[in-house]
Image (cartoon, rainbow, N blue to C red):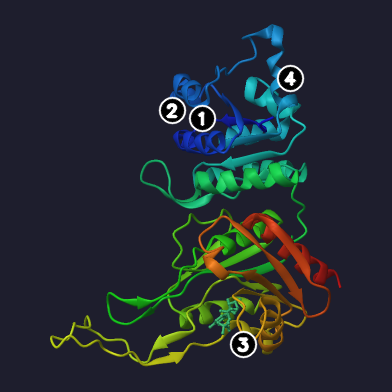
Amino acid sequence: MKPRVVLGVSGGIAAYKASELLRLLTESGHDVTVVPTEAALRFVGAPTWAALSGKPVHTGVWDDVHEVPHVRKGQAADLVVVAPATADLLAKAAHGLADDLLTNTLLTARCPVVFAPAMHTEMWEHAATVANVATLRDRGSVVIEPAEGRLAGADTGKGRLPDPEEIFEVCLDLLDRGAVEPDLAGRHVVVSAGGTREPLDPVRYLGNRSSGRQGYALARTAAARGSEVTLVSANVSLPDPAGVKVVRVETTGQLRDAVVSATATADAVVMAAAPADFRPVTTSDGKIKKPADGSAPSLELVQTPDVLAEISHDRARPGSVIVGFAAETGDETGSVLDLARAKLARKGCDLLVVNDVSGGAVFGSTHNQGVILARDGEPVEVPLGSKTALAHLVWDEVVRRFGA
Ligand code: CTP
């Protein structure tokens, strides 16, 4: 049976973005019932929700009363997600008010509940909203941090609805795990993601095919588990994970500086980025021209700094946990695992997540498989699964080492 999701929509201008979340949910095989508030219908009408979900749309508890909709929808749901959640909706949910179908559904739901707030910065920062969000989180609901950026009218600031794709990923994670424990609360973790680019001239660079998906999954799941997260992102075209500080870099040198500076206060660092190992000795100020005689220029390269080895060997904080990733192909000098064990020792990190990328697997895909090698223990097998599932396994291993 398809997982049943109730998509609550409350009355904010971001209501139209919920249609994208609805599409992501339905296209990935979820049975979605949309429950808007009356105010939400001023922004997006009931026919839109009915057509996109293929189901009737009600806002009140007085339609189809024989089916007892005010309790059935919440009881039957596997997940309730409210996007956007206005300050008013959060207040009602925090206080247990139930004056329409959505608030009744929230009171009767026994499944994970996600709120994706969207409002003006002043409303988000108001003591009333802060207290309501704290109450909802204490009760186990997930309240995603709003994004910063353009708000309704000419204003900008914190309060934007997180990208629908990000809300979708949070929903999938909760449907998969049932609940996410805040076992990284009070911690600061640093994650690097993406592939660095080393410029040859103003238009060309040496780069690689890393999409950044694994690093973004690590950042998102760490935030969901309660951590403060700094994400050092190299040339990634994915939406920012909600509630994460994103530092954008281009080259390995910039990535090194950003990671080293964030590491000073980090409890854990996960190097999921694929830094370019070499850069041109010189970068041409002008575009390198094609020689008329048909020849090709030769490139002289130097090695870039090895960030993982540097932060592992010169630990900024004793007791911090440092994790590397290794995309390996076996060769005549050894199997994938032999090479990975040697790399773990050489780099000096605590954990090394090893992917076998023979045949171009993994890059850009949404799934991952491999093994987590540890300096201090047995390897942990990573079954074929989503990058989110692998991210949780990595954090499980990190949390175990915090305890030790
Ligand atoms: N890494 C790094 N700095 C670099 C290169 C890699 O910090 N200049 C990190 C990556 O983020 C990853 C780990 O090192 O966590 C392993 O990356 P990989 O490319 O497999 O390691 P290399 O040292 O480049 O080894 P190889 O010779 O196999 O390419």
Residue 260, picture quadrant: bottom right
Camera-near label (4 vs 3) is: 3
Which numbered marker is on residue 11?
Answer: 1
Camera-near label (4 vs 2) is: 4
The N terminus appears in which quarter of the rendering? Answer: top right
Describe the element under mark 2 as helix, strand or loop.
helix
- Where is residue 214? Give x, y as percent: 58, 62
Q: Quadrant of ligand 1?
A: bottom right
The alpha-carbon separation of the residues under discs 4 and 3 comes to: 57 Å
Camera-near label (2 vs 3) is: 3
Position above or below: 96 against 381: above
- Assess mark 3: CB under 8 A from ligand 1? yes
Residue 70, picture quadrant: top right
Q: Residue at coordinates 51% horizontally, 56% vertically from top-left?
A: 240
Which numbered marker is on residue 310?
Answer: 3
Describe the element under mark 4 as helix, strand or loop.
helix
Q: What residue is pinned by disc 2?
A: 43
Q: What residue is pinned by disc 4?
A: 71
Q: Residue at coordinates 77% horizontally, 32% vertically from top-left?
A: 110
Frontmost residue, 325 versus 335: 335
Mark 1 surroundings within 10 Å by alpha-carbon count, few (fewer than 14), some (14 through 19), many (20 or more): many
Give, as a three-letter code, the residue at label 4. Val
Give, as a three-letter code, the residue at label 2. Phe
